[in-house]
Amino acid sequence: MVNGHDFTENNEFDGFITKEKNHAFAIKTADCIPLIIWDESKELLCGLHCGWKGLQQGIIGKILEENNHQSLTKAYIGPHICKDYFEVRQDLIDEFMQSGNDIRPYLAQRSNKIFMNLRQLCVDELHEYGIEIYTKYSPCSYTENDHFFSWRRDPGNPLRNLTIAWL
């Protein structure tokens, strides 16, 4: 996580939080969820790169707890891999379970494969904090190949999607 005023071109981070006006910030993703959270008065803006690892480590809860979650009340969930294409292995499931995250409600089994619903995991966590989500639907980065890049669809492709937000 980086504060907007601490950003430099070579920073690597999974999110930003800023009060800076008239500066655009971006989250780069391929299949992970770009999550933008802001406050009612548009004085505080947060952007998170929510992949399975960040979600497993509680990235949403951490940023909300550290930054007075009562003020952050609105969220946008951008394009990401949808539940029908995010195949996971048992080791990923085990990592979640060992960290105290019961992800069984977000798993579905088809054709001897297990798939995970990252969006619903984010939605449920945001709702725990009373955050209103403005996106009822998010495009699938995996299936909409004319519009979005997908690491799982095109392994090795270095191109990424940008979700841009500003106050």
Image: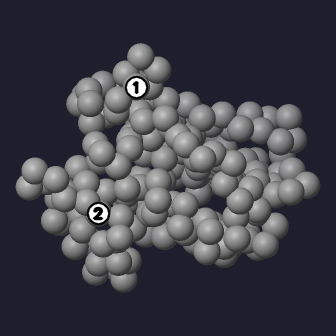
Q: Residue at x 37, y 56 (%)?
A: 117
Viewer can see residue 150: no
Would you identify the image quadrant in which residue 146 lies?
top left
Helix, strand or loop for disc 1? loop
**Residue 100 image point, x, y percent:** 36, 83
Residue type beneath disc 2? Leu
**Residue 43 image point, x, y percent:** 87, 53
Residue type beneath disc 1? Glu
In the depicted structure, whether residue 100 falls above or below residue 58? below
Query: How is the rendered protein coloured?
Result: one colour
In the depicted structure, whether residue 117 falls above or below residue 161? below
In the depicted structure, whether residue 103 falls above or below residue 77? below
Q: Residue at x 60, y 47 (%)?
A: 136
Q: Residues within 10 Å of mark 2 (few under 14, many from 20)?
A: some
Per the image, the residue denoted by label 2 is 107
Q: CA distance from mark 1 to mark 2?
A: 22 Å
Per the image, the residue denoted by label 1 is 144
Question: Left of 134 or right of it: where is 88?
Answer: left
**Residue 69 image point, x, y percent:** 73, 71
Quadrant of the image for the N terminus?
bottom right
Closer to us: 60 or 114: 114
Question: Looking at the image, is mark 1 or mark 2 earlier in the sequence?
Answer: 2
Q: Residue at x 76, y 63 (%)?
A: 72
